[in-house]
Amino acid sequence: MTAPERPEGERSGIALSPRLVAGMVLGAALALLVAQNTRSTKVKWLTFETEQPLWLLLIITAAVTLVIAELVGGARRRRRRRRD
């Protein structure tokens, strides 16, 4: 039994989007950063002062950044759709 022939120029396998690859690279970099920064540190913000593990602060900062980026990106996409 032979494999079906594909038209010329058609690829087989899984296609990875550049956005997915970038996310995977950034996720791996974050994982390494967290693994290397396990000490606790003092955090002062407005009137609060606390001591937290640095890895927790890194994860929280990354999550907040991701949420803000998605909100800004979504607002831009909605604005573009309204213009069209």
Image (tube, rainbow, N blue to C red):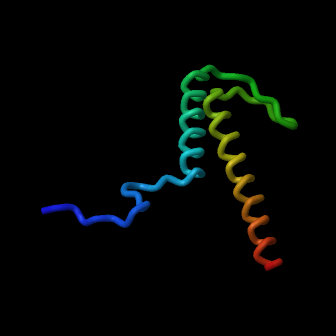
Looking at this rendering, what residue extends furthest in the left direction? 1
Q: Is residue 9 left or right of residue 30?
A: left
The image quarter in which residue 52 lies: top right
Percent x, y of residue 5: 28, 65
The image quarter in which residue 3 lies: bottom left
Residue lying at 65% horizontally and 22% vertically, measured from the top left = 40
Percent x, y of residue 54: 65, 27
Percent x, y of residue 32: 55, 28
Classify 20 as above or below 46: below
Q: Toward the viewer: 81 or 14?
A: 14
Residue lying at 60% horizontally and 51% vertically, measured from the top left = 19
Q: Toward the viewer: 9 or 60?
A: 9
Q: Is residue 68 left or right of residue 46?
A: left
Percent x, y of residue 35: 54, 25
Q: Toward the viewer: 53 or 47?
A: 53
The image quarter in which residue 7 lies: bottom left
Count how many numbered circles sit on residues in the image. 0
Residue lying at 54% horizontally and 43% vertically, measured from the top left = 24
Classify 4 as above or below 46: below
